Image: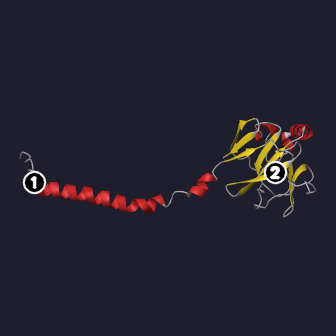
Amino acid sequence: MAAKVKKKQTRRDFIHLTTGALTVAGVAAAAWPFIDTLNPAADVRALASVEIDLAPIAVGQSITVKWRGKPVFIRHRTQEEIEEARRVEQWDLLDPATDEQRTTKPEWLIMVGICTHLGCVPLGQKQGDPTGDFGGWFCPCHGSHYDSAGRIRKGPAPKNLEVPPHEFVDNTTVKIG
């Protein structure tokens, strides 16, 4: 059996290792500007979350704000709207969800105002807009009806209006996103 012969390290080995390490560092330094362009721009990062002052919104009033380029409906619901939303039986819903699951504070309903059927913006935010058969929102494009909790009740939309991630900073300010 032959004994293993230990290879002697030479200057040439050192030069190969140094050249390889510098090549990797050079490629990384050259690639970084390209990789950095894949990050979102500052204006996009600024829209990742938005804070809204709720103090000027009267009971029964709705506003629309923009978040990530999407309309977000914020409604200061009346006690009657809250009670009506809570009376609905789960078996009666196309996409079952309780009112409590859709709201952090019952008087404030916050949801993305895009119909889950084909991406239209439902009516019902302005006074005089049709609110559908259930007193919420109505998408006239294909006839989807949403109730006062933004749940689909009738029509082709498969899901409820989306509730975006949000938290109440204090009693009059909400942060969406």
Residue at 18% in and 58% down = 16
Question: Hey, which residue is sitting farthest left in the picture?
Answer: 2
Q: Which mark is residue 10?
A: 1
Residue 5: percent from left, percent from top: 7, 48
Is 74 or 13 nearer to us in this picture?
74
Say which amino acid is labelled 1.
Answer: Thr
- Relative vertical location of residue 18 with respect to residue 56 in this rendering, above or below: below
Q: Between marks 2 and 1, how big is the CA–CA gap?
A: 75 Å
Residue at 36% in and 59% down = 29
Say which amino acid is labelled 2.
Answer: Ile
**Residue at the disc numbered 2:** 63
Mark 2 falls on what kind of element? strand
Q: Earlier in the sequence, mark 2 or mark 1?
A: 1
Is any part of residue 96 visible from this angle? no
Residue 122: percent from left, percent from top: 83, 57
Crowding at dot 1, Cα within 10 Å, few <14 / some 14-19 / many 20+, comes out as: few
Q: Nearer the viewer, mark 2 or mark 1?
A: 2
Residue 58: percent from left, percent from top: 87, 43
